Image (spheres, rainbow, N blue to C red):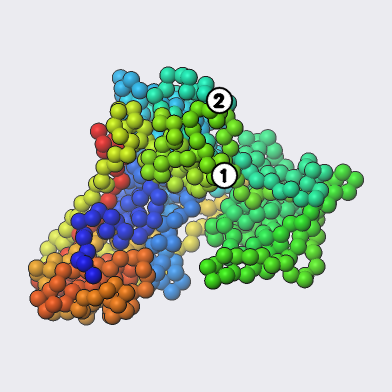
């Protein structure tokens, strides 16, 4: 193998598994250390720089960082650091932060940008462009900003006060908000004097089911996202005693839990696939079960039953799942008799689709598969150069943190477009390596190699939360528990940096390594080397750290996948060939271009 190019900014970034997995590349270990030091305001601002909505995401994020967490790979119970809930610790305990945020200048730069939709993608674009002097006009059909964060996430998961606070941090930057304004025509927007238009309208169409009896049962059949929106805006405050939820995603979990709070006593979730294929986050499923909501799987719906104009329930078949060698699933009907479940109301939560009926098809904006806009995946520019998309409106339903990541990149593109620069221009991320050794055997960070169980987040009493849909279920970590959870972080951003010129090949680092991740051996092909290491390196997604050839003709190989960043190799090394250096990686944003 060739020596590893540690000058490549993405190499050490990939080793920080949590940050690398985050769509917005939030520097997770950096803000967790700040939390451990009770520097909550600083931790909040580190988050706000990347993900814009720390308090919101600290409650609702899909947590792509946590499955990647190194701690989860060493614990017997595979329990990663509670990264998401630590973000909430920073948000709940922060001090005054508004003065730390950039202000929009009074003198604008002469460029106007329209944002269609008031969700996380549009708000992120506004947050990046407003401080640079752009005149921002945000259009949304609701009376407040937030988009589907407001309409689709129930108050018992995301209190309105938290949502309002973080939306207002952006809109208070001098944004011209046009609420209660449904944009009916892209042509009308383009006919105005906007220099660029950003579309962040989400995926607003909930899917329906065409089954026997559906039309007759229409009065008591609800589309999931519409149901949640009607509850959020208090257009609906009750539901039948017996409720069926169709679907296995997070929207279905929100619908079933909301139904319990609106009077549903017998709320049942029915999924056509196996439990392991459910798209809902595991913690969302657990919370639903904790509220006494049964979930039946492998039961595809067959028909609605209506008697004398009134919904009585639904019939369901039974299937079993079979998977081919490529993992493709087939649902095979079984001989089990169909099952009837009584229902006063049925909520269909089986997915969402994009909808752009308001975009005329003769403007030069081309659409492709699933009626999604054809976009450059780096710049988010459409086939009409001054129109950009982001969030769910770009490539289909995702999540808030992905929408924020889209918004940052789209803002760069809009800035370049408005300034006459090639939109494909992207600056490299900002990076640095900082030595962590202060003196002989004295370090600036703590990373003990011990098993450390994840702390559970306390919940409000179920009797209280089921009686009021606005009472938040999760209480969050207190400061002491937040500190203890933060201490579980292995500081993966403190990198093991190897200096070939100082190595005397004593193998002391090999002897002291608790995970046998360091090997000195003859070079070879990667597949061969992975088998010849002190411990086989089986995770092909994580790179090997390979040195140049040493005097003995051997090379140093380190398996980045199982390294704990404990620093024992650097402590033990008699020549300081190993050093621990903190790697700070920052995605370039508009403010860093100027």
- Neighbor class of circle 1 (other Cα within 10 Å; few <14, some 14-19, many 20+) is few
Compare marks 2 and 1 and give the one earlier in the sequence. Answer: 2
Give the labeled residue for mark 1: 370
Q: Position of residue 456 (x, y in %)?
A: 48, 62
Q: Which corner quadrant of the image does residue 380 belong to?
A: top left
Inter-mark Cα distance, 2 to 1: 20 Å
Left or right: residue 423 versus residue 77 is left
Residue at 23% from the left image edge and 50% from the top image edge: 431
Q: Quadrant of residue 112?
A: top left
Q: Quadrant of the N terminus?
A: bottom left
458 or 552, nearer to the observer: 552
Relative side of 364 to 264, left or right: left
| Above or below: residue 559 compared with residue 162 | below
Comparing 476 with 280, the one in front is: 280
Q: Residue at x 58, y 52 (%)?
A: 250
Q: Residue 279 location, x and y as percent?
A: 57, 57
293, above or below 390, in the image = below
Q: Secondary structure at mark 2?
A: loop
Above or below: residue 362 compared with residue 204: above
* Quadrant location of the C terminus in the rendered image: top left
Q: Report if residue 405 is visible in the image.
A: yes
Q: Is the residue under label 1 in contact with that under label 2 (CB below 8 Å)?
A: no
Question: Does 509 sit left or right of 85 as displayed?
Answer: left
From where the camera sits, is residue 99 visible? no
Q: Quadrant of residue 68?
A: bottom left
User: Which residue occupies 22% across, 64% down?
Assistant: 4
Q: Dot 2 corresponds to which residue?
A: 185
């Amino acid at each position: 193998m060739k020596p590893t190019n540690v000058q490549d900014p993405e190499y050490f970034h990939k080793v920080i598994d949590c940050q690398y997995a985050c769509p917005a590349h939030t520097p997770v270990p950096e803000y967790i250390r700040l939390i451990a030091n009770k520097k909550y305001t600083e931790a909040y601002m580190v988050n706000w720089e990347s993900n814009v909505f720390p308090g919101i995401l600290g409650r609702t994020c899909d947590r792509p960082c946590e499955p990647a967490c190194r701690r989860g790979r060493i614990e017997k119970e595979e329990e990663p650091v509670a990264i998401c809930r630590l973000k909430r610790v920073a948000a709940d305990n922060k001090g005054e932060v508004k003065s730390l945020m950039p202000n929009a200048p009074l003198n604008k730069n002469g460029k106007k940008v329209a944002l269609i939709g008031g969700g996380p993608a549009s708000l992120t674009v506004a947050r990046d462009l407003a401080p640079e002097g752009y005149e921002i006009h945000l259009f949304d059909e609701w009376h407040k900003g937030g988009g589907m964060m407001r309409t689709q996430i129930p108050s018992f998961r995301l209190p309105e006060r938290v949502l309002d606070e973080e939306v207002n941090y952006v809109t208070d930057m001098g944004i011209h908000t046009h609420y209660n304004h449904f944009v009916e025509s892209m042509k009308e927007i383009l006919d105005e004097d906007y220099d660029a238009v950003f579309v962040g309208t989400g995926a607003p169409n909930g899917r329906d089911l065409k089954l026997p009896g559906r039309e007759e049962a229409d009065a008591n059949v609800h589309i999931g996202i519409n149901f949640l929106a009607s509850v959020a805006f208090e257009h609906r405050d009750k539901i039948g005693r017996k409720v069926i939820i169709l679907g296995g995603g997070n929207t279905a979990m929100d619908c079933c839990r909301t139904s319990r709070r609106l009077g549903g006593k017998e709320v049942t979730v029915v999924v056509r696939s196996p439990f392991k294929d459910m798209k809902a986050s595991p913690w969302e499923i657990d919370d639903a079960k904790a509220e006494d909501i049964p979930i039946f799987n492998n039961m595809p719906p067959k028909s609605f039953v209506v008697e004398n104009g009134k919904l009585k329930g639904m019939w369901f078949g039974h299937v079993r799942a079979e998977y081919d060698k490529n993992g493709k699933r087939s649902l095979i009907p079984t001989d089990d008799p169909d099952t009837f479940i009584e229902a006063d109301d049925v909520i269909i939560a089986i997915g969402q689709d994009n909808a752009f009926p308001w975009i005329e098809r003769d403007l030069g904006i081309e659409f492709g598969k699933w009626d999604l806009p054809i976009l450059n995946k780096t710049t988010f520019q459409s086939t009409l150069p001054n129109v950009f998309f982001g969030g769910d409106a770009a490539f289909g339903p995702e999540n808030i943190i992905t929408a924020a990541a889209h918004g940052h990149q789209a803002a760069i593109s809009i800035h370049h477009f408005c300034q006459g620069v090639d939109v494909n221009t992207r600056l490299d991320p900002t990076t640095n390596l900082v030595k962590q050794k202060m003196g002989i055997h004295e370090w600036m960070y703590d990373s003990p190699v011990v098993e450390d169980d994840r702390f559970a987040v306390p919940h409000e009493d179920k009797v209280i939360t089921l009686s009021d849909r606005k009472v938040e279920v999760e209480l969050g970590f207190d400061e002491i528990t937040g500190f203890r959870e933060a201490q579980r972080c292995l500081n993966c951003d403190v990198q093991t940096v190897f200096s070939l010129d100082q190595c005397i090949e004593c193998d002391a680092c090999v002897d002291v390594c608790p995970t046998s991740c360091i090997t000195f051996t003859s070079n070879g092909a990667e597949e061969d080397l992975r088998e010849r290491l002190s411990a086989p390196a089986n995770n092909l997604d994580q790179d090997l750290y390979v040195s140049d050839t040493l005097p003995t003709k051997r090379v140093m190989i380190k398996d980045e996948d199982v390294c704990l960043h404990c620093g024992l190799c650097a402590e033990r090394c008699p020549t300081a060939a190993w050093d621990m250096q903190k790697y700070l990686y920052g995605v370039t944003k508009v403010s860093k271009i100027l």
